[in-house]
Structure formats: structure tokens, C-alpha cells
Amino acid sequence: MMNQYETVFIATPVLSEAQVKETVKKFRDIVTENGGEMIHEEDWGMKKLAYPIQKKSTGFYHLFEFKANPEFIDKLEIEFRRDEKIIRFMTVKLDKYAVEYSRKRRSVLKEKSEKEG
């Protein structure tokens, strides 16, 4: 049975734009190669951290929303821990209310981008 998850991870600020994209692609591929299904992805860009992590005060934030088997999450989190480019990550299982909220949020974001474009 596949559950819906949301993962936010922070990449170290010393990376180039290409390195950030490469890291994001690596984790996107890990999700899809292990039978996961990407639903949504957001690049939040560089943001200031609430407190320093590894003597860094900023980081590149990225959000994945995906469906996967529960056993896969341990595997994904091990990959996050092994990658020195990732300074923090958090994965949350979405309940039916969070899934609905997320769906509404995506449609609002889509409407905003269509109005701007």
C-alpha cells in the first residue's frame, strides 16, 4: 500500500546552481527508481536558517511530495544522511486532511502562476 509523503530538505549553501539541480535530480531518481510516484516538487531557493547548522546560516530548500511504500522511507532517509550536500531533511506522512490541503495549495499556486504568466 502506498502512502503519500512530503519531504523538505536543505542543501548546503556552498553549492553551485548546477550542483543543487544535480542533488535534487539524484533524490528525485531515488524516489522513482524505488517505485515511488512524484506528485509535486517545489524549489524554495536559498533561505535563511532559523539557527546555524554546521556553521552555515543559509541553505537551498526543496520540497518533494510523493507516494511510496512505507519501507522505502528508511532507505530514502539513509541516502539523505549519507549525502554531505544535505544539511537537514524531514519526511512527513500525510493524512487524508493534509493530502486535501496540499492538493488545494497546489491548485492555488497553479492559478497564481497562470495569472502572472
Image: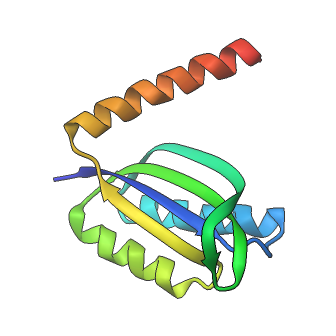
Residue depicted at 65% across the width and 49% down the height? 44
Q: Is residue 36 above or below residue 95?
A: below
Q: Residue furthest front?
A: 51
Q: Where is residue 79 in the image (x, y as percent from the top left)?
A: 47, 79
Residue depicted at 37% across the width and 65% down the height? 34
Residue depicted at 52% across the width and 21% down the height? 108
Q: Is residue 85 left or right of residue 64?
A: right
Q: Where is residue 25 in the image (x, y as percent from the top left)?
A: 62, 62
Count the numbered circles shown.
Answer: 0
Q: In this view, does 64 lie above or below 97?
A: below
Instruction: Please state which of residues 21 and 86 is positioned toward the viewer in this rendering.
Output: 86
Q: In this view, does 103 lie to the left or right of 1?
A: right
Q: Where is residue 64 in the image (x, y as percent from the top left)?
A: 49, 52
Q: In which quarter of the image is the C terminus?
A: top right
Q: In this view, does 79 lie above or below 61?
A: below
Q: Where is residue 86 in the image (x, y as percent from the top left)?
A: 59, 76
Q: Residue furthest left?
A: 1
Tell me where residue 69 sits by quadrant.
bottom left
Tell me where residue 111 sits by quadrant.
top right
Residue depicted at 33% across the width and 57% down the height? 92
